[in-house]
Image (cartoon, coloured by chain):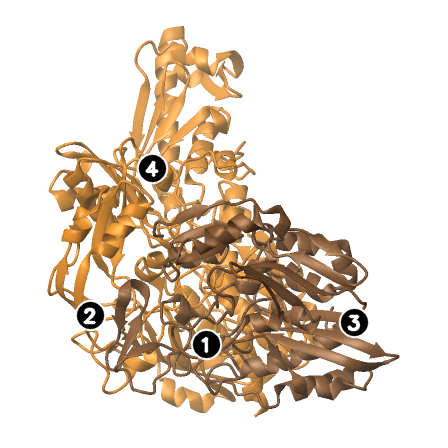
Amino acid sequence: MRAFEYASPTSVDDAIKALASHETSAALAGGTDLLSRMKEDVLRPGRLVYVKAIKDLTGISVDRTAVSIGASTRLVDLVEHPALKSDFPSLHQAALEVGTPQVRNMATLGGNLLQRPTDWYFRNGFGLLGGKKQGRNLVRDLEGEYAPIDVPEKAHLVRDGDNRYAAIFMTDGDALYVNTSSLAPPLIALGAQATLLGPDGERTVEVADLYRIPKSADESELTIKPGELLTRVSFPSSKILNATYEIRQKQSHDWPLVLCSVALDMDGDNVAKASIVLGSVAPIPYRSAAAVQAITGKPINAETAEAAAKAATEGAQPLSMNGYKVALTRTAVKRALLAAAGQRYWEA
Amino acid sequence: MASWPENPRLISGEIPRVDGLGKASGKTKYPSDIHPEGMLFAVMLYSPHAHAKIKSIDTSKAEKINGVRGVHLLAKEGATLRFQGDDIAAVAADTEELALDGARAIEIEYEILPHVATERQAMADDAPKVNPRGNVQKGRAQVNGEPDSAFDQADAVVEATYSVPVITHVCLETHGLTARWDSENTITAWASTQNVMGVSGELGGAFNIPPTNVTTLTEVMGGGFGSKFSADSWGIAAAELAKKTGKPVRLFLDRAQEHMAAGNRPSATGKVKIGVTKDGKIVALTADTYGTGGIARGAGFPLPYVYEVPNSRREHSDVFLNGGNARAMRAPGHPEGCCLMEAAVDDVAEKLGIDPLEFRLKNLPEGDFKTPIYQAEIVLGAEKIGWSERKPRGKAEGKGPLRIGYGMALHTWGGGGAQDKQVNCIISPDGSVELRSATQDIGTGARTILAIIAAEVLGLEVKDVYSNIGNSTFPPGQASGGSTTTPSMAPPALNAATQARDELFKRVGKAINEDPSKLSLAKGKLLVDGKETMSFADACRKLGMMPVSVTAGFTEGLSSNGVGGCQFAKVEVDTETGVVRVKKIVAVQDSGLILDMLTWRSQIYGGVIGGLNYGLFEEQVMDPTTGLFLNADMELYKLAGASDIPEIDVIAYHTEEMRKRGVIGVGEPPTISTSAAIGNAVSNAIGVRVPRWPMSPMNVLNAMTNQES
């Protein structure tokens, strides 16, 4: 790890100042992602601003209109919050399945939303778009190295490489990594908004709009601007059917292979309005309009869930190794819908 | 002739590890925790490329960094780097961060060479050569009987390709040592090693000083699994830097380099054809196999395995590529051979419609001493796992999308000891007892076991004996590999303790005017004619100024060689996700006389968990384009966590007949057949063979999809 400056402000204002007074500052919360990337030398912030000591950034409040969660709230506090557990199981369940108890004791809501991709080409210093090229050479960020010469011009590290965990949707472009945030899908499905504070004041965006697909190797996949701090996430507290289903290889400490969150406004037995959001299948949290369309106006049962699941994967464009993720996506959508309806057919 | 006690008080009991509390509470210092005064931290700079030549290297900027104390080059200009992680340089500095800054400041111009990082790339016709003799080196065919014509007698034949990936040892304590020069020709090295004497020998050789001038200390160590026999290039680099700087230097690898450079278990792929008669006897097997150990040879493995195969032909190729070199890994070759053989055996039994357990019993080698052992073990294991609940492949049951499957596999190992090792037993006039030997405890409980033996002989409690090992200057002890430590060290420990006791009787007898033949020891007391007369400590006071010190070696009749063993797995597969959960593993193991049931069982648990990782999770992922090891971490390189560990039922096959065989090592056997049993259980659950390990959702779903199409 390279040397860096460190600030531990106790107020939001001081945090903004601390962030602004260095060109390459980064907010440090749980550090479960950031510190690892710094040790790998993939990220090299010149200053870390510790934001977990700021009281205003932590805590969960639930009132008649909204649930509001400070960005520095730990995942363990999300998991243990009774109202979230009873009314927003999609968020509770997604938080519960992140990492390990040790990770959840450290990691925060903001950190989970703004973590960098787990993509192994990114982590090895080749950026997010399948390899930065200089002529026909690949450029590796780590130490400014060149990795092998004479790569075919159209070669793409992910498309032509080991893409078992890569995207199956939106794969026409060069961004083939996946967004692995476990909390983004449930929050987007619940209609959550994020508050960002910067030197120029506060702005509020949809959680979905925290993400973008970078157009160039130097562009971030996150829309948060340098010097800005994610302070809060809030969503309507109105009762709504919701659930998350995550598929991962290991029971302990693993990333989702596919995750699906659903939020369903019911009109009697039928779905009036739905939001179905997938994680780990595309470079951004992926809303499935086709699945929504398939379930809208219908009751939730094995048959309609299956139909929505099938609709969700129509148009999937898996890569050479990750066709199995299409099947996983189908299962995740089906199970998330049936979980919301309390029909957990897969539990022994 | 020496023999083990008929009715032991401690041996074969359940004795807790003498250093267990220290380890569990964090009090024990591992070699990487030891920071002698004035110590510098060193790091390795290793090749960032899969294949490259160093055109120029300039360390001047690194050496100018304030706090950087020494730079040592392992690769010079013109050197070829053959894999990501290959050695370039070591840098010592006041802190680890400064050492890293120094490593980054070394300026190197590379000529990047074409690489082959995957077996497919290495085996291509026009592939760049990693080895001047070619990337694919085929060994001589091993032929037994008449395999080609024998297939004519077969009523059922299965031909399939199975494969297991490269995995790494993932020692929790990475490789390394801390070296201190105590004079111009003496070194102390605190090393994480399974071979203290070997480390001293290598360091001595590297600096042209006698090995006895190098004291290698390994009080405990954080895992070796076959990868820590050597001082290694980086250990010698630490001593070079210590010499250069005049300060102790600590150099332990980081996790990524541990994965890349500190060894691996080679992959194995085999096209296996097996023919059987309708009454369930194997008549022939042919196998074309290959595997890679990176830049090194060593991808061989036994096949056929365990079963009687009258006619066989085996052709094997080692594939060379730009990856880190293979090292011995717990039961070298056997897990690979076991997976391939047991998959083929299972598949052909299913094809014939015979219960795979019955099929296995029919094909055990006639006349082999292990056959009745296997037969007995299979009965015990089948009962414990509930084999009678097993349904034939394709008919597995379970709730909703879940399917329960059962699988089994057999294994074998040697586990005999060396016959040239020694233990020194010292009984001091204050009543303290110490054992010394230049062996070490890789985790098998060697320290505890030696103490148990001496305590048994001397009528003491285990805590009364100080088992002093992990010091290369003591009488020669065994390197911890091949399940040989206990069978090598237990006989000399018994002999040393027995002879020391006899010497004690002689001298104390003289002092108290009793014939030594009338003396005995029990419950911490000296007995004369069976009557307690004084405490052990008071008896020892009669020694005056001179302790008893006896160094003894091996004698016949205390140890043996060759074990069987079988494992059973019960798994639950979610057929919609391909996620496999192992519900239970039953491990039945013989290993002659078991000295301590607790440390013995602990070996089985560790072996099974390692096998479970091999079966479900582990895989080195090499990138074809960049030639890099993509998952050199402990995150995307997957390993079981606590919730992934099933119920593990360990059954010791420890009959009177087994006890009479004497001591046999048990480090390797229990890790061999776990992954094979899991693979068979998954196939039983989902109705189709998953030909590629690990049993990941990707591999399971792909196998199911291939079946459908």
- Quickly name the residue at label 4: B470
The residue at 20%/40% (across/down) is: B242
Regarding residue B84, the answer to whether it shows in the image is no
Q: Secondary structure at mark 1?
A: loop
Q: Chain of mark 3?
A: A
Q: Chain of mark 1?
A: A
Q: Position of residue A53 (x, y in %)?
A: 57, 45
The residue at 50%/46% (across/down) is: B600
Left or right of residue B638: residue A216: left
Q: Chain of mark 4?
A: B
Which one is earlier in the sequence, the residue at label 3 or at label 1?
A: 1
Regarding residue B208, the answer to whether it shows in the image is yes
Mark 3 neighbour class, 10 Å CA radius: few under 14, some 14 to 19, many 20 or more = many
- Quickly name the residue at label 1: A214
Q: Colour of chain B?
A: orange
- Quickly name the residue at label 3: A241
* Quadrant including the C terminus of chain B: bottom right
Q: Which chain is brown?
A: A
Q: Position of residue B392 (x, y in %)?
A: 65, 78
Q: Secondary structure at mark 4?
A: loop
Residue at far front of view = A200
**How far is mark 4 from mark 1, CA to CA?**
55 Å
